[in-house]
Image: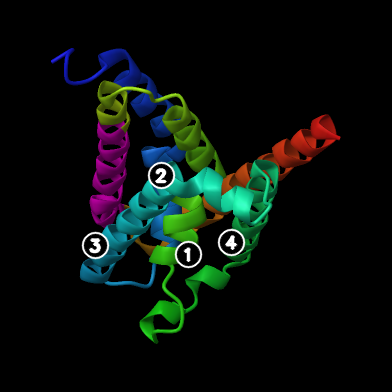
Amino acid sequence: MSAVLDAQLLAEVFVTLFVIMDPPGTVPVFLALTSTMASRQRHRAARQAIAVAFGVIVVFALFGQQVLDYMNISLPALQASGGLLLLLVAMELLTGKMEEPMPSETGSVNVALVPLGTPLLAGPGAIVATMVFVQHADTREAWVSIALGVVAVHLCLWLSMRFASSIHRVLKDSGTTLVTRIAGLLLAAIAVQLVADAVKAFIEAA
């Protein structure tokens, strides 16, 4: 097995992305964003969000640095933009706007794609971490390890959202509302931290 993959690198990739993408932490936000959906719609949203997140991670892993260089975009700029978008979502959760009928039902906006798939799951932190791992991958074993680590984390994300419906049945509507407010507060803190880290990076680079 060691000749096929690097177990230490696999563990490092998995743990790093697991902490950044935080599968257990996505449950309250997922419930908040899909609170008006039926169980079947929520399952479909989970699949779509995972597919989008996986696609974004893979694209940036393979072509991320070239895309950013071509568009003259720095990693701190990407991080700040993701933080601002998450902050807008957090404000909607805190004010209860997300409890209104989802635009996704009318086909105008699909919350499984934005903000759930990206930048919540495939956010700046996960993108940058994956790009760093890829830049240091110089053997086939390293590439296999990175790929398996990314797939394993996304499997954990899917499982956490797949069983979010069971959590919703236990919490009922009042409990989901409470979780929504807490999720909004936590998401706002994450967004502010992303922006603060980006500002710090800008200052250090100046």
206 to 100, vertically: above or below:
above
Q: Which residue is mark 4?
A: 89
Q: Which mark is residue 186?
A: none
Q: Is residue 137 above or below residue 158?
A: above
Is there any visible trace of residue 123 in the rendered image?
no
Secondary structure category for the residue under label 3: helix
| Structural crowding at the residue carrying mark 1, measured as other residues with C-alpha within 10 Å and reported as few (<14), some (14–19) or many (≥20) | some
Q: How crowded is the residue under tag 3: few (<14 C-alpha within 10 Å), some, or many (20+)?
A: some
Q: Looking at the image, how many numbered discs can be counted on the residues?
A: 4
User: Mark 2 against mark 3, which lies toward the viewer?
Assistant: 2
Tell me what residue is drawn at x 58 percent, y 61 percent: 89
Number of the front mark, 1 or 2? 2
- Please name the residue that numbered disc 1 is placed on: 114
Residue that carries the numbered disc 3 in the rendered image: 43
Q: CA distance from mark 2 to mark 4?
A: 29 Å
Structural distance between the alpha carbons of marks 2 and 3: 29 Å
Q: In the image, what residue type sits under mark 3?
A: His
Residue 65 image offset from top left, x and y in percent: 54, 43
Whether the magenta-drawn stretch holds residue 99 is answered as no
Q: Foreground residue, 73 or 168? A: 73
Q: Amino acid at mark 4?
A: Val
* Residue stretch rendered in magenta on the structure: 147-170
Identify the image quadrant of residue 124. Answer: top right
Q: Give the residue displayed 68% in from the left and 52% down from the top.
A: 72
Upstream in sequence: badge 3 or badge 4:
3
Q: Are marks 3 and 4 in contact (CB under 8 Å)?
A: no
Q: Which residue is mark 2?
A: 62
Disc 3 to disc 4, how far (Cα)?
A: 21 Å
